[in-house]
């Protein structure tokens, strides 16, 4: 098994190897510009543990979903619960229960926010850049950015006419077809970009009676990007997208199966979620030192599914979900340069309207009559400012603060239950950066993060009906550097976080659990990213994270969990590999990635074993076309997860090896 010592040793050996090989001039690594701090900066000069995937990197790594970036990002995990639209993110060992309808990691796609595990996904077509910010980002991003933010930025259409048609054909019915195209409708004034992708694949779980696969997958995604630049100082864009899935049953089955995975469900499962997004962005350059930006967004996620949770011929627990999550947001931001000082300030509003319909049918309640619709509304207002001020030629102070006020209420249909509450939060951040030389920086950061409070509408005791925000204080020490004429990149960070008022599921009476602020925890770890050009053809890369997130204090009537590992907090994750690309067109890449053992409950009974997967891709590239042969999970390693539901008698099964061909034609 690959353990943490081997990860560190691999990085050290790679650095030693490269330092001895690099005796001749080779091309340097490209400079990557990011907007992590809401203004354009070189990623190597930003005092944040930050993983970035640009357009070329996304293509080389075959990133087609948010889950894919977890393999390449230290201490980032996406726990797929076996159903599209139910993917919980975890950064540095901190995650959230899906029943809280909130997440400690915020997703922003062209400024459109997603702050819940429900619908934590988006299509990744015609993308310019993906940024993963680790550590509290509440100063600039507000609520539910407690331990990180994922930013996805679509490529802007311009005067250049470009397009691409691509397809993937693989085993088990894998089929993918897509197109991207953009260009100017009126030169220098009006531009348009369009994207579309269809994806499908056969399932891998069979029904015992019909012999048919029950979990076939199919999705469609489309996006339109309109851009208008009437003057040199005004840039207006409207991006609209829609995704629709038509999937089968949840990827659950009885535990202990290996070769042929079967279920005997007495209902036909399905998942047909849709997501619609709209983002209107207006950038206005008042003068050379002052910029004004407005982002207006709307997102509607319709979660519709039929789930046989017991996957048996009996009606033990069946779920029928038909919920709609709607979010409207508005941010006004002012960027001002005063001499060498950079100021970003702004105001933010959002409104969430969640209509939650979850019918639960059991042997005791076969009609689901005890299930009631719930209507959850939330309004948030935030004011923020961030200042980057050079103290001396070597030292820079990066500080900011944000004030958020949030009001929530929930109404349970068919009852007299109505609960409302208000929360206020101040999120400060201070970072001191030291420029060691023109290619290296070191920084130390202290920041506060928080996750929104919420409700337990069916709580019998009034003190359990709502729970407060979760708060943490983070301490981080980081280092970023480029070596050997920018042919080697080495970034590292060490962090320590104290979590108070932790939101956990507490068993208050046998069989009854609520989300409460009943725990405290500590998270500590290290993150490393390394990339090196051995020559103009060969690139080495490695990344890894070590993490220890455990409860300092947490107990309920079922036991004392103090000292246990937090759910969805793998001990480590890593990626190591190499890429070969020559001007004549030949290409090859191999990646080895993996996660340490991961628990999914506070008692640490149910888990996913440590695993490592090998992905490969070889092909031929020319100016107008590409062709690749690929294999995901080349050695067909099992990486299933024991389900905490039904006392571990079910397993969330994962796809096996996939082999196929990728084709692309550019015009």
Image (spheres, rainbow, N blue to C red):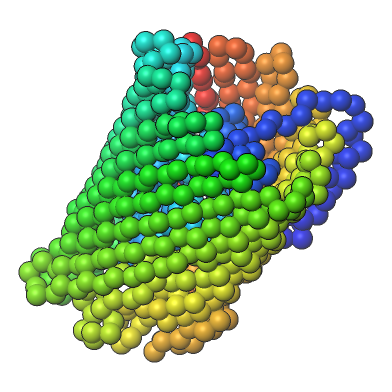
Q: Quadrant of the N terminus?
A: bottom right
Is residue 528 found left or right of 137 in the rendered image? Answer: right
Q: How many marks?
A: 0
Front-most of residues 497 and 294: 294
Front-most of residues 45 and 169: 45
Residue 665: % across, % down = 50, 14
Q: Write down the quadrant of residue 425 in the picture.
A: bottom left
Residue 211: % across, % down = 31, 45
Q: Is residue 266 visible?
A: no
Front-most of residues 496 and 275: 496
Q: Is residue 305 above or below residue 371?
A: above
Picture residue at 60% right of the left edge, 61% below the top: 430
Picture residue at 90% right of the left edge, 26% below the top: 24
Give the farthest residue toward the left. 414
Front-most of residues 46 and 399: 399
Picture residue at 71% right of the left edge, 53% below the top: 391
Is residue 378 found left or right of 550 in the rendered image? Answer: left
Q: Write down the quadrant of residue 351 in the picture.
A: bottom left
Q: Is residue 584 above or below residue 427?
A: above
Q: Is residue 139 above or below residue 159?
A: below
Give the farthest residue toward the bottom. 557
Residue 180: % across, % down = 42, 21
Residue 516: % across, % down = 36, 78
Q: Is residue 474 visible?
A: yes
Picture residue at 89% right of the left edge, 34% below the top: 21
């Amino acid at each position: 098994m690959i353990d943490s010592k081997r990860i560190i040793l691999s990085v050290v050996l790679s650095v030693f190897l490269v330092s001895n090989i690099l005796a001749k001039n080779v091309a340097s690594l490209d400079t990557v510009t990011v907007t992590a701090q809401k203004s354009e900066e070189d990623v190597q000069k930003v005092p944040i543990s930050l993983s970035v995937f640009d357009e070329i990197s996304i293509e080389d790594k075959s990133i087609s979903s948010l889950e894919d970036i977890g393999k390449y990002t230290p201490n980032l995990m996406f726990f797929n619960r076996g159903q599209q639209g139910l993917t919980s993110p975890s950064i540095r060992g901190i995650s959230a229960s899906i029943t809280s309808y909130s997440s400690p990691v915020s997703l922003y796609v062209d400024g459109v926010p997603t702050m819940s595990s429900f619908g934590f996904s988006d299509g990744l077509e015609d993308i310019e850049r993906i940024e993963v910010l680790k550590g509290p980002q509440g100063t600039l991003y507000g609520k539910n950015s407690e331990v990180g933010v994922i930013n996805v930025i679509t490529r802007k259409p311009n005067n250049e006419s470009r397009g691409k048609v691509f397809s993937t054909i693989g085993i088990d019915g894998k089929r993918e077809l897509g197109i991207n195209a953009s260009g100017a409708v009126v030169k220098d004034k009006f531009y348009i970009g369009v994207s579309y992708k269809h994806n499908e694949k056969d399932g891998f779980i069979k029904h015992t009676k019909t012999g048919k696969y029950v979990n076939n997958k199919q999705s469609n995604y489309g996006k339109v990007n309109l851009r208008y630049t009437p003057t040199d100082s005004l840039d207006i864009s409207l991006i609209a997208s829609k995704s629709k899935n038509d999937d089968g049953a949840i990827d659950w089955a009885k535990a202990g199966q290996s070769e042929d995975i079967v279920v005997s469900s007495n209902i036909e499962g399905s998942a047909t979620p849709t997501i619609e997004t709209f983002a209107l962005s207006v950038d206005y350059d008042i003068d050379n030192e002052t910029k004004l930006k407005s982002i207006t967004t709307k997102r509607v996620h319709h979660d519709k599914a039929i789930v046989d949770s017991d996957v048996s011929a009996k009606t033990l627990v069946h779920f029928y979900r038909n919920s709609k999550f709607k979010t409207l947001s508005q941010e006004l931001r002012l960027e001002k340069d005063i001499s060498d000082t950079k100021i970003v300030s702004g105001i933010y509003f959002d409104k969430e309207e969640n209509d939650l319909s979850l019918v639960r049918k059991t042997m005791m309640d076969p009609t689901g009559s005890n299930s009631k619709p719930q209507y959850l509304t939330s309004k948030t207002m935030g004011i923020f400012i961030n200042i980057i001020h050079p103290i001396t030629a070597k030292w820079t102070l990066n500080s900011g603060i944000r004030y958020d006020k949030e009001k929530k209420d929930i109404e349970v249909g068919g009852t007299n239950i109505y609960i409302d509450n208000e929360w206020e939060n101040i999120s400060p951040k201070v970072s001191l950066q030291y420029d060691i030389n023109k290619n290296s920086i070191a920084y130390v950061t202290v920041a506060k993060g928080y996750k929104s409070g919420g409700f337990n509408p069916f709580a019998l005791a009034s003190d359990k009906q709502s729970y407060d925000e979760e708060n943490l204080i983070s301490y981080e020490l980081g280092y970023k550097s480029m070596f050997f004429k920018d042919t080697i990149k080495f970034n590292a960070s060490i962090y320590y976080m104290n979590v108070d008022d932790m939101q956990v599921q507490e068993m208050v009476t046998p069989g009854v659990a609520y989300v409460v602020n009943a725990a405290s925890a500590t998270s500590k770890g290290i993150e490393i990213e390394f990339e090196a050009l051995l020559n103009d053809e060969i690139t080495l890369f490695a990344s890894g994270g070590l993490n220890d997130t455990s409860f300092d204090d947490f107990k309920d009537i079922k036991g004392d969990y103090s000292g246990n590992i937090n759910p969805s907090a793998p001990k480590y994750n890593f990626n190591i590999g190499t890429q070969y690309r020559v001007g004549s067109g030949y290409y090859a890449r191999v990646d080895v990635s993996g996660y340490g053992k991961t628990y999914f409950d506070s008692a640490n009974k149910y888990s996913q074993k440590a695993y490592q997967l090998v992905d490969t891709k070889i092909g031929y590239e020319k100016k107008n076309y590409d062709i690749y042969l690929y294999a995901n999970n080349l050695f067909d390693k099992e990486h299933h997860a024991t389900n905490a539901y039904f006392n571990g008698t079910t397993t969330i099964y994962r796809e096996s090896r996939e082999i196929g061909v990728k084709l692309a034609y550019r015009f």
